[in-house]
Amino acid sequence: MTTTVRSPAANPRPVASGRRLSPEELRGLATELRVTTSRLLRRVRAAASGGLTPSQLACLTTLDEIGPLRLGELAAREGVSAPTMSRTVDGLVAAGLAFRRPDPADARSAFVELTNEGRRAIRAATDRRTALLATHLAELSVAELRRIHAVLPVLHRLADALSGSRRGHDRIGQETEDDADDHRRAEQ
């Protein structure tokens, strides 16, 4: 049996089953996987965003999952600077999706919290994304759907391994709170 591995240039190369891929073939497969999954995710997010930017939706999702956070904590979790997060939060506050509550312990600080409308916006975006993907999955053949279903456990293991290596873990599959956040975000 022969499997086809595409290179970044989309030139299919047959790879005999049962043998390990060469470093060059692994790099080509990694590139194709990264490009394809990124493209799929971007398109689903863009088509079903409900007018929210990716950073706004990520911010809302974090607040929904964790609860009220100080601006600096939210910025750190999202991997952006405090001024960038402040602009994002300003947009969410203006749209009625979040609000700032003064920190009783520190008058210079405030907590950012979701409004009910913010929670509804997250649910609506998640529902739109899932429906969009389901609509396009329905256009695939049964054999294609089975192949996608069969590869999901492998992709989960790969995501877990990447999460672990990013955090310095030695064991594949060791789930952290951040890994659980990654799984919840994948649903959105």
Image (cartoon, grey):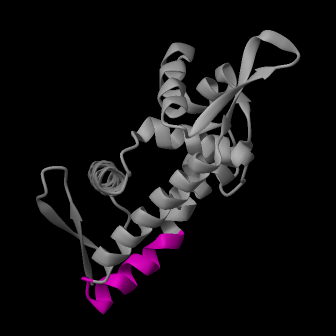
Main SS of the magenta part reads helix
Residue at 39 percent across and 86 percent down: it is 146
Q: Quadrant of residue 131?
A: bottom left
From what the image shows, is residue 72 above or below residue 152? above
Residue at 64 percent across and 28 percent down: it is 74
The residue nearer to you, when weighing 151 against 184, is: 184
Q: Position of residue 50 (x, y in %)?
A: 38, 51
Task: Name the quarter where the N terminus is drawn.
Answer: bottom left
From what the image shows, is residue 152 above or below residue 82? below
Q: Is residue 97 left or right of residue 147?
A: right
The residue nearer to you, when weighing 128 against 182, is: 128
Residue 90 in magenta stretch: no
Q: Position of residue 185 (x, y in %)?
A: 55, 53
Boundaries of the magenta span: 139-153
Residue at 73 percent across and 48 percent down: it is 176
Q: Position of residue 2 (x, y in %)?
A: 24, 79
Residue at the limit of the structure toward the right, as seen here: 105
Q: Tell me if I can see residue 170 in this picture.
A: no
The residue nearer to you, when weighing 163 against 23, is: 163
Q: Is residue 181 left or right of residue 135?
A: right
Residue 151 in magenta stretch: yes
Q: Quadrant of residue 32?
A: bottom left
